[in-house]
Image (cartoon, rainbow, N blue to C red):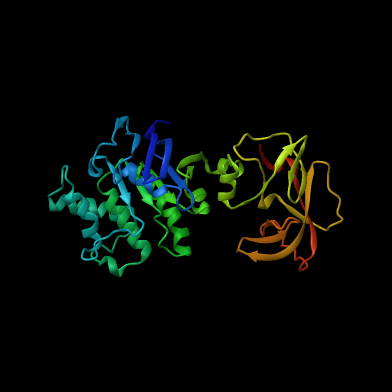
Amino acid sequence: MSAAIELSGIVKAYGDQRALDGVDMALPENAYISLLGPSGSGKTTLLRVIAGFEAPDRGRVLFGGRRIDGLAPHQRGIGFVFQNFALFPHLSVAGNIAFGLEQREKDPVTDPAKVKARVREMIALVGLSGLEDRAVIQISGGQRQRVALARTLVTEPNMVLLDEPLGALDANLRARMRGELRSIRERCGVTFLHVTGSETEALAMGDQVLVLDRGRIAQASPSGELYSNPASPAVARFLNCYNVLTGRPEKGVFHTAAGRLPLGSHLRPAAEAAYAIRYDRIDVRPLGAPIAEDEARFEGTFLASEYSGSAVNSFFNLDDGQVFEVEAHLSRKQPETYQEHGRYALVWKREDALVFA
């Protein structure tokens, strides 16, 4: 698959602080890409550099094989959907969508009939038929988000950048809009780059997920690969589904402050030594229950359980004071109830652990 956009050695600093520290990446054409990272990792800065709202201090941005880092935003063929939607409150739904067509610098559309036809197409595409004449202050948050997207798509960009587009919506609407955005992107056939701080949203939305950490791309993988095989302890921590223990591997054993763990067959090279086990790969057993030869085990003191709808997450204190989390999916079985301050064995397969060395 050919690249829609390529970034090479992108550096952007504000004073002594580097927001982007040598970013290299290539995004495929006709794909939904999630850009995931913690607050302050440089996500929005990267989006603004691609869009042309910020100029990089060093590096190159190529779009369709053409260098664009010296071009103005409106000359790049890239659309931008802002987190707060940035709609014009004095214009109707149709008026907001028509604005980009009528006011663009290159080839503005001046024929009212053509504008009306293009706006009608976009309104149908994003599911807003019947709301053409409604003021944008009279429609819901989800509908305003679709207006902002339609206003961008009507100009026929070759790529769309979305800066936390679901952040202003409530939880139920966010879940519904995930599917809506993916469906709209597929019908348009252009690349969407969707910035989010939510690991759940990034994994659900992206054909590929880029993880940005301290101004650098820490991992670029399909969603399933990222979830099962984070490339570093930092990525595992940010996914918020792994217990990550610090320590050191030595002679078939990983030494942690809470005790020693037998190693599996594979160590992953990383800048930081760590032992990671996913929440849903752990069994909770009575303290004296036997374990198999291919299993690892810690002891923990039960703290509390938290119901999240499809799963129950239980929290245990290890002997070093670290909180260890276990996830039980309700589709598998009814969750266990644990005795308050009771001691339990936390057991998993050795090969399910990710060991970084």
Vertical relation: 173 (above or below) 99: below
Closer to the camera in the image, 223 or 319: 319
In the rendered structure, the answer to whether residue 165 lies left or right of residue 224 reads: left
Give coordinates of residue 66: x percent, y percent.
Answer: 29, 31
Quadrant occupied by the N terminus: top left
Pinpoint residue 339: horizontal percent, then vertical percent: 78, 67
In the drawing, does residue 127 fall left or right of residue 348? left
- Tally of numbered tags: 0
* Camera sees residue 29: no
Image-quadrant location for residue 349? top right
Q: Is residue 342 visible?
A: yes
Q: Please state, as top left, top right, bottom left or bottom right, where the C terminus lies in the image.
A: top right
* Left/right of residue 65 with respect to residue 257 in the rendered view: left
Q: Work out which residue is located at the far front of the displayed protein and give it.
A: 16
**Residue drawn at the location 45% of the way across and 46% of the way down:** 34
x and y percent of residue 155 in the render? 24, 46
In x, y percent, where is residue 337? 75, 66
Q: Residue at x 80, y 41 (%)?
A: 294
User: Closer to the camera, 34 or 212?
Assistant: 212
Asked whether, in this view, residue 293 is left or right of residue 139, the answer is right
Image point (71%, 65%), residue name: 303
Which of the two residues, 77 or 172, is positioned nearer the viewer here? 77
Pick out the residue farthest to the left: 111
Give the image quarter of residue 227: top right
Picture residue at 49% right of the left edge, 51% below the top: 38
